[in-house]
């Protein structure tokens, strides 16, 4: 089973590189990421979080009827100007929840495991989840969206939560 990195593991701050080869190994990585995500009851997981620094994300957002998705080299090609607040958690920050402002609607271009390009228009929690996971691929974590004061408070809370475990 793939191990999920926890903040402040330095691997979380690495920028992932684009996938160039759509081969069996890529499919195997996606499968293992799906297993790790379900085992941790997550709704999304990025390559970065399992120390595989390639642009791969897996998602299974409960509000999304289409269910499980793999997005290779995902890119946000359009985002709505208006932002809304979402309560977010992250498998790399167990038990920490913070409100993050993000675009409510985005258009995302990505490739599937065979290398075929597709686009999706994502709204609400699916949009939130995709933005959160793409941030991971860029070496960014959800608390980075907070003001410095709120970020410090969130990190202090997380360090306390980590000691309780
Ligand atoms: Ni996360």
Image (cartoon, grey):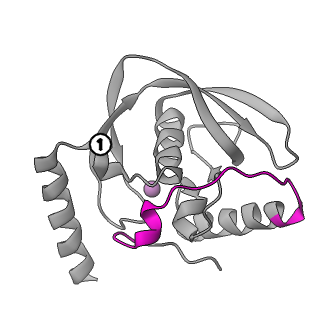
Quarter of the image for residue 163 reads bottom left
Residue 59, given in percent of the width and then of the height, sits at 62, 49
32 lies above or below 61: below
In the rendered image, residue 131 lying in the magenta stretch gets the answer: no
Looking at the rendering, the stretch of residues picked out in magenta corresponds to: 6-25
Q: Nearer the viewer, residue 38 or 45?
A: 45
Is residue 91 at least partly visible in the picture?
no
Is residue 67 at least partly visible in the picture?
yes
Residue 90, given in percent of the width and then of the height, sits at 41, 58
| Disc 1 within 8 angstroms of ligand 1 (CB) | no
Seen at 23% across and 44% down, the residue is 146
Left of 4 or right of it: where is 101?
A: left
Q: Residues within 10 Å of mark 1 (few under 14, many from 20)?
A: some
In the rendered image, residue 11 lying in the magenta stretch gets the answer: yes
Quadrant holding ligand 1?
Answer: bottom left
Quarter of the image for residue 76 reads top right
Left of 52 or right of it: where is 139?
A: left
Residue 153, given in percent of the width and then of the height, sits at 13, 57
The residue where tag 1 is placed is 145
Seen at 58% across and 56% down, the residue is 16
Q: Nearer the viewer, residue 115 or 98?
A: 115
Q: Secondary structure at mark 1?
A: helix
- In the picture, the quarter occupied by the C terminus is bottom left
Seen at 71% across and 27% down, the residue is 119
Q: Nearer the viewer, residue 118 or 42?
A: 118
Quarter of the image for residue 103 reads top left
Seen at 62% across and 70% down, the residue is 36
Furthest residue in direction top, as rendered: 81
Q: How many marks?
A: 1
């Amino acid at each position: 089973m793939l191990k999920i990195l926890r903040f402040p593991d330095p691997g979380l701050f690495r920028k992932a590189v684009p996938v160039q080869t759509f081969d069996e190994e890529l499919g195997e990585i996606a499968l293992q990421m799906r297993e790790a995500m379900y085992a941790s009851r997550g709704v999304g997981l990025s390559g970065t979080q399992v120390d595989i620094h390639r642009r791969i994300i897996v998602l299974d957002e409960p509000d999304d009827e289409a269910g499980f998705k793999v997005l290779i080299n995902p890119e946000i090609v359009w985002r709505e100007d208006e932002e809304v607040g979402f309560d977010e958690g992250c498998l790399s920050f167990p038990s920490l929840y913070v409100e993050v402002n993000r675009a409510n609607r985005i258009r995302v271009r990505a490739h599937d495991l065979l290398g075929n390009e597709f686009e999706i228009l994502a709204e609400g929690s699916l949009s939130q989840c995709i933005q959160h996971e793409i941030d991971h691929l860029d070496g960014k974590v959800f608390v980075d969206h907070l003001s410095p004061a709120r970020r410090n408070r969130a990190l202090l809370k997380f360090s306390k939560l980590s000691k309780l475990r």
